[in-house]
Amino acid sequence: MENLLDSIDRSLWHVDARLRTSYPGDRGTRQPVHTCYIPADTYHPGIPGEWGREATEVLDSFAGTADALASIINAPLELASEVLPLVRAKLAREPIEDLRLDFEDGFGSRSDDAENAAVEEASASLKAAIEEGEAPTFFGIRFKSFEEPTRRRGIQTFARFVGLMVTDGRLPEGFTVTLPKVTAVEQVEAMVAVCEHLENSGGLSRGALRFEIQVETPQSILSSDGTAAVARMIAVASGRCSGLHYGAYDYSAACGIAAEHQSMAHPVADHAKAVMQVAAAGTGVRLSDGASIIFPVGSDDEIRFGLRHHAQLVERSLHRGYYQGWDMHPAQLVTRYAVTFAFYRRSFAAAARRIAAYTGGPGAGASTDEPATARALAWFIIRGLQCGALSESEVEGATGLSGETLDSIAFERTNLH
């Protein structure tokens, strides 16, 4: 038997190695609940505060009571009562979790001189915000795609911005970049080559530059040979791909969907996001849903409609395992946080009971959850803590577990790792 076991081990060693390399699991660091995009030339250090104040005005006017908020997010009154002060505090403390300065669609096509000037001004403003403690926890840029018409300009902006952000051979913590409109695996390989060049020329450590792939073309989901291109993109990124961000409108338009019906909730969107989800599972690459361009603006009725519409989309994404999305307008912060907080608080008690039972904590009974489910329960609670939906005291009181213990459960390695 020992000879047989040794033989099987030898025959499968390469499978074991591939699993460890290709599916390392989540890094365990915080994932923002959203990414806010603004044209790069409009950025200044006070943007997060301005968005927070505008969002608070909308909250006060349209969801300032538990009754009003419950109606907007379709939640029980008691839950809305819990969420309302948390949203208000979040808008004052951290209105934007992740900010992307956009040199792509939001910036448009301008002269090289104009774009170079915008790079200089935006990078200087961002560095000032970091030094003054006014920058969001996460930030970065989106530059033009690697398609032929915009490739050179995009790389120049990427390189120039990174060069200006480097201090003493390091990039600021929380900095990332977004590669849009990817249509070929080779473009991701080219992006890796650019990152390696910038690291070598800028004195950065290897792997310092990571990037998000924006999935907004059918070619990034399915290659012409019928293979799942997005899975190959993750593989060729050599560990540099930090996220897959779905682009609802470009993708829907490319699939021939009429403008009126383009949405994150359209069946073509669900198909693309399901493929993205399977491709990213276990790789440590995180997922983000797209944006709603139905903003809460206009008449009172139009604002209420925009808030409810956005709330429904955020909740839909959360239920499907997409814990991040895009926000394009300050008023969307109201429903982003209200729905996200309600999502975690609604299920917290049941999750706490189950993880306590699994670990023999407060009120523990017989646990039927398997280790994989326990990891999911722990990670759910950790996400709630990270975004501000839950407090450390209530988590420890309900589970009997510290944050470190939850981390150890959430990121425990299985036999595959």
Image (cartoon, rainbow, N blue to C red):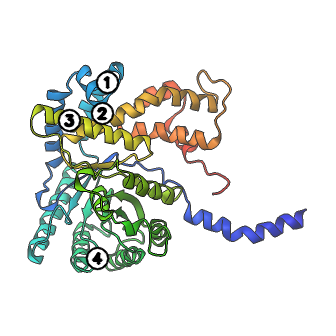
Give me the residue at 56% from left, 26% from top. Answer: 353
> Which residue corresponds to mark 3?
305
For the N terminus, the quadrant is: bottom right
Residue type at the position of mark 2: Ala
Q: Secondary structure at mark 3?
A: helix
| Chain-order first, disc 1 or disc 4 | 1
Q: Residues within 10 Å of mark 3 (few under 14, many from 20)?
A: some
Of tags 4 and 2, which is closer to the observer? 4
Q: Residues within 10 Å of mark 1 (few under 14, many from 20)?
A: many
Of tags 3 and 1, which is closer to the observer? 3
> Which residue corresponds to mark 1?
80
Percent x, y of residue 132? 19, 51
Percent x, y of residue 207? 42, 69
Of tags 3 and 2, which is closer to the observer? 3
- The picture quadrant where one finds residue 179 is bottom left
> Which residue corresponds to mark 4?
147
Q: Secondary structure at mark 2?
A: helix
What label does residue 338 carry, if any?
2
How many angstroms separate mark 1 from mark 4 (CA)?
46 Å
Q: Is residue 107 above or below residue 64?
A: below
- The picture quadrant where one finds residue 9 is bottom right
Percent x, y of residue 13? 71, 69
How many angstroms separate mark 1 from mark 2 (CA)?
8 Å
| Chain-order first, disc 3 or disc 2 | 3
Is residue 18 visible from the viewing direction of this image? yes
Q: Is residue 134 above or below residue 250?
A: above
Q: Are marks 3 and 4 in contact (CB under 8 Å)?
A: no
How many angstroms separate mark 3 from mark 1 (CA)?
18 Å
Is residue 93 visible from the viewing direction of this image? no
Of tags 3 and 4, which is closer to the observer? 3
Please indicate whether residue 377 sits to the left or right of residue 417 in the image: left
